Image: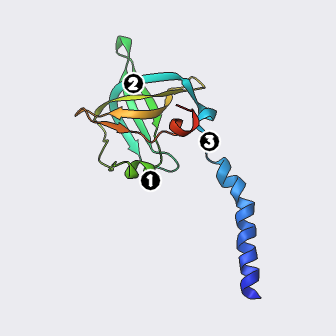
Amino acid sequence: MKNAWIKAAVVSAGLFLAPFVISAHHSFAAEFDASKPVTLTGTVSKVAWTNPHAHVLLDVTGQGGKVTSWDLELGSPNALIRRGWLRSTLKPGDLITVVGYLAKDGSDNANARSITLSDGRKVFAGSSSESESGK
């Protein structure tokens, strides 16, 4: 009887908390625009291996020498590792080119689709755009 009560409590708690966990993650289409591709070349200033998405801060020098710091969203750390990434794949100071999609709100944010490293290798960024944008 005690085991049945514990199982019921765990299931109830899981059902109660599920909407909160699901709402913490956003879909690609909610934040990014698949019809607005972008290519950025710059210097990595920070790499954050965080869940649910890893992020790369990229300093891009525009016309007139103005530097803009872009926040690039990648896939989850687990998805990147499954694609062969190491924590050392990107590091501050690396010069990279990123292909991705702009944020809908016009901010300096983008969802990265692929990254060309300074040695010419191209790595997939684990973007959620593959599964949600239909591309």
Q: Nearer the viewer, residue 41 or 60?
A: 41
Q: Which residue is mark 2?
A: 40
Tell me the element at label 3: loop
Q: Are marks 2 and 3 in contact (CB under 8 Å)?
A: no
Residue at 41 percent of width and 39 percent of height: 125
Q: Secondary structure at mark 1?
A: helix
In this rendered view, identify the residue nearer to me: 3 or 53.
3
Q: Position of residue 27 (x, y in %)?
A: 61, 40
Side of 73 where 59 appears, left or right: left
Query: What's the residue type where badge 3 is placed?
Result: His
Q: Residue furthest top?
A: 64
- Mark 1 or 3, nearer chain start: 3
Q: Position of residue 67 (x, y in %)?
A: 38, 22
The reply to whether dot 1 and dot 3 touch (C-beta < 8 Å) is no
Q: How far apart in space, not on screen, are marks 2 and 3 (Cα)? A: 23 Å
| Residue 105 position (above or below residue 124) | above
Q: Amino acid at mark 1?
A: Asn
Q: Is residue 104 above or below residue 117?
A: above
First-in-chain label (2 vs 3): 3
Which residue is the site of mark 3? 26
